[in-house]
Amino acid sequence: MRFERKLTLAVLALFIPPTAVAGVILLLLYRRGALEEPSSLLTAVLVGLAALMSYLALVTHGLARSLGRTVKDLRHGVELIATVNPGHRLRIRTGDELQALGEDINRLADLLDAARRGRTPGMDPAVQTRECDQRLADLAFVVFDTETTGLRPEAGDRVVSLAGVRVEAGRVRRDRTFHALVDPGRPVPPESTRIHGLDAAALAGAPPLSAVLPAFLDFAGDAVLVAHDASFDLRFLAPAAARLGLSALSGRPVLDTGLLSRSLHGPGEDHTLEALARRLGVPVVGRHSALGDALTTAELFVRLLALLTRRGVHTVGEALEAMRRARTPIV
């Protein structure tokens, strides 16, 4: 039975018994002479109840159809994530919260589709081809991290700190770092401050991201970007770069240490920053500060590069392919 029929019958089932009871009571009162003008009153009441039932049936059926479409859309959303079906996106219009959920699923699908193709969202395919043929041992990298006001840029969360460190010739260049506080243009929630320690006082006088991001990209130059859980940081930085007309962010591959770890150690292991640091013997210093996390991730990346080489992964393209294979559908 279809969803809307089930819901309609369920609601009607709540009202039919009391309506029937009311009709029986009125009929008994009429037969016992308790009503002076029973015929007109009984008729009016029964007609009113019938009209109410018809109205409830129509409203409930309309609501059920709307909810039925929403449930169907959400089921399709789960399917598109499971299959990474390119081009299929949700169209939810039932309520702000459900619409926001549909938008979140669509954004996730975009990221998964981009990963399936072995590139980051918005990456120039011509640049991708050129970069993918380069050997990892010959490249410079910039490992970066952000701290934010929250987890949802689409809901207004913004960057509060951006940092990066260069990795050259298999060595973390602690003498070549970038770190900047960022004015998010909105209050920092207390729960976020408890994580990274940044509040309004700490960010007072900080430049906006529109000034910090170009400076960071200048620092990065032609280096390959690396991050732990890179898709999170890119959800904040890529839209800002697009608004500013900065093509440098989308014109390069981005490697993810979490996915590289997954490709090496398997999906059954824990691939959080802390777990990976324990596994590879890297001390974690300055956790949940952008520069501290960037430095930790850089040390992890150097060790992962050595492991990847032993596995026969020598080029950027091969690393991206390892990341692609490491991804599993989210259901």
Image (cartoon, rainbow, N blue to C red):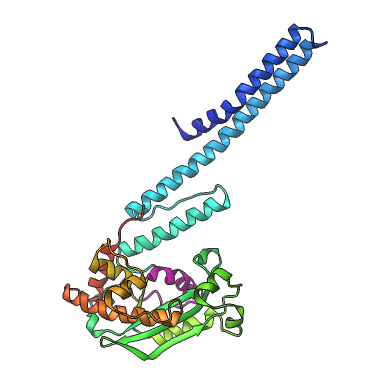
Query: Which residue is most to the right?
Result: 36
Whole-percent x and y of residue 295? 37, 83
Quadrant in which the N terminus appears: top left
> As drawn, is 222 to the left or to the right of 46?
left
Q: Is residue 122 visible?
A: no
Residue 313 is covered by the magenta coloring? no
Whole-percent x and y of residue 12? 58, 27
> As drawn, is 74 to the left or to the right of 326?
right
108 or 326, nearer to the observer = 326
**Which SS does the magenta portion mostly show?**
helix
Residue occupying the point 53% across, 71% down? 192
Residue 52: quarter of image: top right
Whole-percent x and y of residue 286? 43, 81
Residue occupying the point 30% across, 68% down? 259
Q: Is residue 30 visible?
A: yes
Whole-percent x and y of residue 5? 50, 30
Residue 75: quarter of image: top left
Residue 246 is covered by the magenta coloring? yes
299 or 142, nearer to the observer = 299
> As drawn, is 63 to the left or to the right of 89?
right
246 or 25, nearer to the observer = 25
Total numbered labels placed on residues in the image: 0
Q: Is residue 139 above or below residue 308?
A: below
Query: Which residue is most to the bottom?
Result: 175
Q: Is residue 5 above or below residue 114?
A: above
Residue occupying the point 24% across, 78% down? 305
Residue occupying the point 58% across, 33% down? 60
* Magenta residues, start to end: 229-251
